[in-house]
Amino acid sequence: MTEKKDALVTEITPQTEDFSQWYLDVVRRAELADYSPVKGCMVIRPYGYAIWELIQQALDRRFKATGHVNAYFPLFIPQSLLLREKEHVEGFAPQVAWVTKGGDEQLAEPLAIRPTSEVVIGTMYAKWIQSWRDLPVLINQWANVVRWEKVTRPFLRTTEFLWQEGHTAHETAEEAQEETLKILELYREFAETELAMPVVSGEKSESEKFAGASRTYSIEALMGDGRAMQAGTSHNLGQNFAKAFEIQFQGRDKSLQHAWTTSWGVSTRLIGGVIMTHGDDSGLILPPRVAPYQVVIVPIQRGNWQETVLPRAQSIRDELVKSGVRVFLDDRDAYTPGWKFAEWEMRGVPLRLEIGPKDIEKGQVVLVRRDTREKAVAPMAGLTAHVGVQLETIQRALLDRALKFREEHTIRESSYEGFKQVMDGRPGFVVSPWCGDTACEAQIKAETQATLRNIPLDAARWSDAEGRATGPPCLKCGRPAVAEAWFAKAY
RNA sequence: CGGGAUGUAGCGCAGCCUGGCUAGCGCACCAGACUGGGGGUCUGGGGGUCGCGGGUUCGAAUCCCGCCAUCCCGACCA
């Protein structure tokens, strides 16, 4: 706006039509990530990486608690192996990067850089699994993958990205399905608890299914601009990969059987989701659970503050750290308090603690919430406990706010005209009866840009004993619907 | 990959149309002083292969060609 503002963040406004520019500004100014010399590849900077580490820890805890273990598989996939599962290779072929030379020598067989690891892991599982006693295999890996994307955006879609991919093998179809849904629920709970990001968890349609899967489930979140984002997927691969990679075992009944496998993953994309779910005009807002700094202490530099205020600030910091709070004491002399306030707000620190000479006289500090900007004084006595409560309050308030936003932007609509109007004007989810036909879904997408995000597990489903659809008319074609589906324009 | 736009200091831009002094401005940065409870003030400084590569010209940030990158809109995708 004015010449002074470029160092400021006041022009960051998710409410405007330029949400996308706002997003890019936040990513860069908050120092979450930066562009690299390689097309489509970003550098995750320390502040952004710290968020990823917190996400990793929270997820890893949950994986281990459900019996999964970590391992690591290679980055390269021999071409011949990649070609084994037909649907899988067709789905990923356009996005695969290849290594054709090693040093000066042409490779006898090109190596794909993994776009995902079903192939390598499936190959290894074939070696490791002989008997029903070897099952289940419950392995996760934290890794990077490469997909040659045409359009990239920091965190949301980059050529190389970090993720976790779980790969499990089971004795029965029922167990594999149970695992698939268990992880879907784990993701949902994780997103809501840690990221304060409410999600719709449900099943993908045939056309949106993972290449090679029998069934794909996803969690879908709603961003601040009303577009949906797929935040995680869980696939039941049936016996497709087991057959392609000969993962066979001898069963309890002595017969030779193919294993039932699953795979599931979430990526650094989640960070993009956090930014776009909670951010506001002043920049980032981080849920306390994944905030690298949950509290920033700003000492008011006045008079002989180094002798009076600073020691007090330091002891508060030490006490908070001792109780497990992530704190940064911003004692940099070069910046004014006002500058620091704005800076840390832009970087999304959930709670700011101000302490100055006046506060020390009164035995108090000033606490300011990032989400509401509410300023309140808190007595020095019992401060640590109070901060803990405040952080929990903020975490919950962010989830409530996001939930309310989603509810306000979710509309039920059964006529196609109404559907088109809503999609055209007001972004968000539209919930409509759908016939289950892929062609119908494709037409909706072509005409409105909206895609079927998923059919929630608890959505209304209509079919008779023979499996025929018996629901109300499909929004597009008018034939009886099989279920109520959630549509949105998506990232 | 199609359509459009942009690329000049860390960031945001002017200069280009109509080629020519030492490439400029704001913020940021460095030094010092005064300041300090919502992005302070003053003084003095440093920083540029003008995205990259060719070409035209006595001379190119400026004109021409090619490439690359980024952004927006589509098609494709976590």
Image (spheres, grey):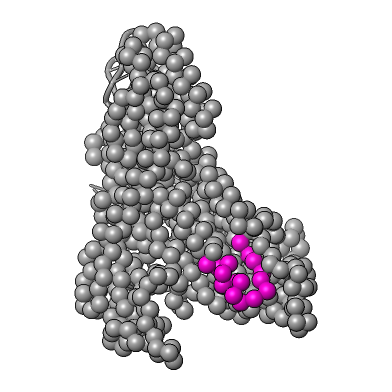
Would residue A414 be seen by someone viewing this image from the given angle?
yes
Would residue A7 be seen by someone viewing this image from the given angle?
no
Q: Quadrant of residue A254?
A: bottom right
Q: Say above or below: A364 vs A21.
A: above
Of the pair A249 and A269, the residue shown nearer to us: A249
Residue A199 at x, y = what percent? 40, 59
Does A106 lie within the magenta span?
A: no
Of the pair A164 and A200, the residue shown nearer to us: A200
Q: Say above or below: A470 vs A369.
A: below
Residue at the location (54% across, 48% down)? A58
Residue at the location (28% across, 80% down)? A475
Residue A59 at x, y = what percent? 55, 52
Question: Which quadrant holds the N terminus of chain A?
Answer: top left
Q: In the displayed structure, does residue A47 sit left or right of residue A221?
A: right
Q: Say above or below: B49 vs A74.
A: above
Question: Which quadrant holds the C terminus of chain A?
Answer: bottom left
Residue at the location (44% across, 19% down)? A313
Bounds of the magenta segment: A166-181
The residue at the far bottom in this view is A466
Of the pair A33 and A222, the residue shown nearer to us: A222
Residue A173 at x, y = what percent? 61, 77
Residue A16 at x, y = what percent? 25, 51
Residue at the location (35% across, 59% down)? A222
Does A168 lie within the magenta span?
A: yes
